[in-house]
């Protein structure tokens, strides 16, 4: 059986409800098989045209409770009858390359729920809080028919905000005692967050954190932005505020669909993924020429710019 036929069979089985087939399909995507998702785009029955799932990115600094909040959101979504997929990206060790992939331990409440699929992914050194295969895996999950896809990033710091381009709605989690409003602004939170939530709101300092974030949002209110990110108080460990948080996430999607922002984000997401695939294929094609050119540059027979121009010209 060809790889394309295998992936088509796996896709059909996954759409029929087989978690094993879906897991295998995602493994093929993670292994670098760029052709795997083709059946998800071109099925004769319209399978996988995409756009049906609400992709929610969940990000924040380490320790704010991303996994606990994700677990609570899954329960709330299931109570509303939604099929939910969770894609949890874990950091990889810079020494061994391994990752703990421990989010499924924290989400054990949903392990036997056939309406929930949980997949951990290693970042494998990828910066920005996501894994390189995340966009392709999200498309596969969309093609299979999930209503909501929750993408939980690694614990990100300043400038690691790729999730803003990879999701329909971005939820930024904060916690008391983890920095003031100025620090949040430095980390880009005010730019990427569609909904902001202060988790562990039962702890001292929660109201001060919310006040500081709202003050920073007001300072940026002069910037043209149709959607004003709400700042909510939640305590995911005991479920407080989760329903209100889910309402805010769904309200953002409805607003983005109405004003065209949702389509614009999805087009940008598709463009970024296409560019990444094109660059990867070009890199493969020119690897030998680049190696030869590097030897010529070191020997003094060429320079990097001339060598690059010659390689690009040879591509036609």
Image (cartoon, helix red, strand yellow):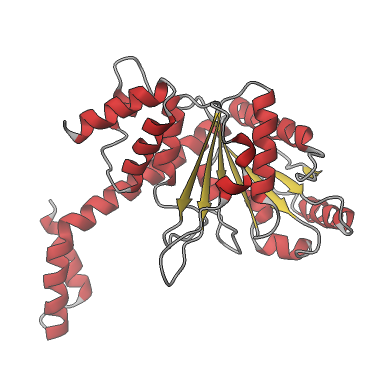
Residue at (45%, 38%) from the top-left corner? 138
Please provide percent x and percent y for residue 196: 72, 46
Q: Report the residue at 45% width, 32% height from top.
A: 141
Look at 24% across and 31% down and name the residue there. Answer: 6
Depth order, front residue of 261/122: 122
Q: Residue at x 41, y 20 (%)?
A: 16
Residue 121: x and y, percent?
46, 50
**For this view, does 95 lie left or right of residue 176?**
left
Above or below residue 7? Residue 191 is below
Front residue of this view, candidates 315 and 3: 3
Point out the image quarter for the N terminus.
top left
Residue 97 shows up from this direction: yes
Let me know if residue 194 appears in the view: no
Left or right, 281 with reference to 181: left
User: Between residues 33 and 277, which one lies in front from this camera angle?
Assistant: 33
Q: Is residue 203 above or below residue 303?
A: above
Depicted 61 relative to depicted 33: above or below: below
Instruction: Note whether 225 is above or below 113 in the view shown.
Output: below
Q: Nearer the viewer, residue 105 or 73?
A: 105
Residue farthest to the front, as pictured: 112
Numbered circles on residues, count: 0
Percent position of residue 151, x then y: 55, 43
**Residue 204's x, y, as percent?**
89, 58
Q: Is residue 147 left or right of residue 63?
A: left
**Toward which corner of the image does residue 212 lie, by quadrant?**
bottom right
Q: Quadrant of residue 34?
A: top left
């Amino acid at each position: 059986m060809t790889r394309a036929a295998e992936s088509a069979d796996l896709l059909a089985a996954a759409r029929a409800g087989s978690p094993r087939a879906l897991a295998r399909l995602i493994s093929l995507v993670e292994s670098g098989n760029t052709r795997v998702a083709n059946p998800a785009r071109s099925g004769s029955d319209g399978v996988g045209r995409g756009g049906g799932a609400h992709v929610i990115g969940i990000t924040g600094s380490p320790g704010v409770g991303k996994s606990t909040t994700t677990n609570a959101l899954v329960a709330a979504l299931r109570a509303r009858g939604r099929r939910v997929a969770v894609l949890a990206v874990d950091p990889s060790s810079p020494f061994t390359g391994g990752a703990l992939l421990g989010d499924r331990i924290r989400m054990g409440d949903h392990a036997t729920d056939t309406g929930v699929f949980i997949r951990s992914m290693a970042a494998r050194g990828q910066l920005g809080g996501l894994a390189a295969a995340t966009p392709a895996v999200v498309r596969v999950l969309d093609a299979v028919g999930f209503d909501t896809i929750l993408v939980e990033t690694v614990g990100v710091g300043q400038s690691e905000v790729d999730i803003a381009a990879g999701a329909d709605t971005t939820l930024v989690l904060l916690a008391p005692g983890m920095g003031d409003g100025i620090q949040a602004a430095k980390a880009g939170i005010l730019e990427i967050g569609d909904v902001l939530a202060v988790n562990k709101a039962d702890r001292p300092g929660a109201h001060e954190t919310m006040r500081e974030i709202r003050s920073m949002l007001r300072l940026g209110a002069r910037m043209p932005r149709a959607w004003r990110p709400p700042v909510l108080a939640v305590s995911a460990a005991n479920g407080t505020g989760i329903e209100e948080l889910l309402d805010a996430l769904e309200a953002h999607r409805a607003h983005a669909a109405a004003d065209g922002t949702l389509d614009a984000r999805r087009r940008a997401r598709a463009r970024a993924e296409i560019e990444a695939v094109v660059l990867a294929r070009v890199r493969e094609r020119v690897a030998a020429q680049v190696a030869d050119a590097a030897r010529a540059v070191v020997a003094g027979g060429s320079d990097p710019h001339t060598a690059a121009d010659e390689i690009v010209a040879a591509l036609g």
